[in-house]
Amino acid sequence: MLDFKTVWTKLRLPFLLSFLTLFGGSLGYHLLYPHEPWWRLLYMTSITLSTVGYGDIFQVEHSPTATLYTMVLMLAGMGLVLYSISTITAYVLEGQLGELFLVQSMRRRVARMKGHYIICGAGETGIHVISEMVHSKHEFVVLEADTAKRDKIRGLFPDCCVLVGDATSDELLKEAKIESAHGLVAALSNDKDNLFLTISARMLNHEIKIVSKAIDLTLVGKLKTAGADYVVSPNFIGGMRMASEILRPHVVTFLDGMLRGKDKSARIEEVVVAKSSPFCGKSLQESRIYEECGLYIMALKSPGGAADFIYNPPLETRLNAGTVLLFIADKNQHKKIHNMFATER
C-alpha cells in the first residue's frame, strides 16, 4: 500500500542529489572565499544553479579558478537539479502523490469506524455485496489485493473505502478495525483463502459475524468449524435460482424487489429485540407495531429456542430479549421499528 515511506523511497534520490549539489557547491565557494558567511555562499550557489543571474556577488570574473569552478558548477549542477525536478514533477503529474493523500484519507476514515462491515474481495461476488452495502447505507471497508479491481470499485462507488493488500493478513485486518467490526464477508476467489481468512478473523474478533463464500460444497463444514456463521455457495444459490425461475417465477420477482430494489423500495429487513427495549416481554399485540410503523411481522425466531422461524406469528406471541423479527419495510419504517426495539448493533 502506498504510504509516506514508499514516497520517500521513490523520491529520496532526487532530493538527496538536490541537497548535495547545493551543499557541495557552497562548500566549493567556501574554499575559494573562506571569509564569506554561509548564507552568501548558499545564495551564490542558488543563483548559479538556477541561472537567475542576479549578479556576480563574489566578483568571480577576477579569479580564473573561481570562474572555472562556477562554469563547472553551472553545467554539472544544473544537470543534477533538472533531473531531480523532472523526477519529482513526473511523480506528481502521474497522480501518485494524489493517491498517497487519498489512501491516507481513507485510513483516517477507517480508523474512526465502529460497528462496520469488512468486505474481503471485490470480485464477481464481492462487487454485489458492496453494491448492497452502498444502497443500504451501511458503513463498510473493502480489502482487495488487485489494484485494477480497486480502481473499478472506486469508479462505481467513489465514496467507498478500499484498502489494498492481502485480506488474509492480520495486519491489514487490524487496519480495517476488525476488533470493532460488526461483520465480515469472505468473498475471495479461492476457497482455501476464505478458510484461512475465516480462521484469522475469528481469532482477532470472537464476536464478529462472518459470512464466507464457498465454491466447493465439501468445504462448508470446515468453514463453519473454522468460525464462519454462514456459508454461501454461489453455484448452489445459482442452481436454486434457476429452478425457482421455472417453478415459481412470481415469487422470485417478488423477492428480487425486496432484496434488490432501489433506495426507496421496501425490503425484507430484520430487527432484534433488545433487553433495554420498553416492549421487551410484551406481546405483538401490546407492542402495536402496525399502528406505530404501518407494517406486519411476517416471521420471528425466539432466542435459545428452535432454529426454525415462526411464520405469521399470532398476536399473543411474547417478544423476549434476543427475539428476531422479520418484516417488509421501507427505510422510514425500518428506522421506526429499529427505534422501538432499540437493536443493539
Image: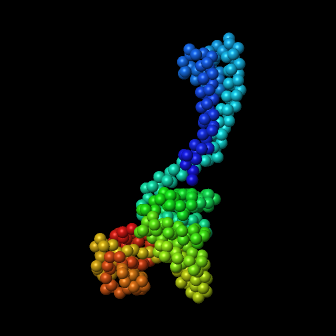
Residue at horizontal 46 percent and vertical 68 percent from the top: 202
Q: Quadrant of the C terminus?
A: bottom left
Say which quarter of the image contains residue 64. Answer: top right
Q: Residue furthest bottom?
A: 247
The residue drawn where x is 50% and y is 58% is 171
Q: Is residue 135 visible?
A: no
In the rendered image, residue 81, in percent from the top left (x then y), is placed at 65, 32
| Residue toward you, 198 or 341 | 198
Q: Is residue 53 above or below residue 9?
A: above
Q: Position of residue 125 (x, y in %)?
A: 58, 70
In the displayed structure, does residue 65 sit left or right of residue 262? right
Quarter holding residue 303: bottom left
User: Quadrant of residue 63 in the image?
Assistant: top right
Q: Nearer the viewer, residue 99 or 132?
A: 99
Identified at 44% across, 75% down, the residue is 269
Name the spot of residue 74 as percent of width and height, x first: 69, 25
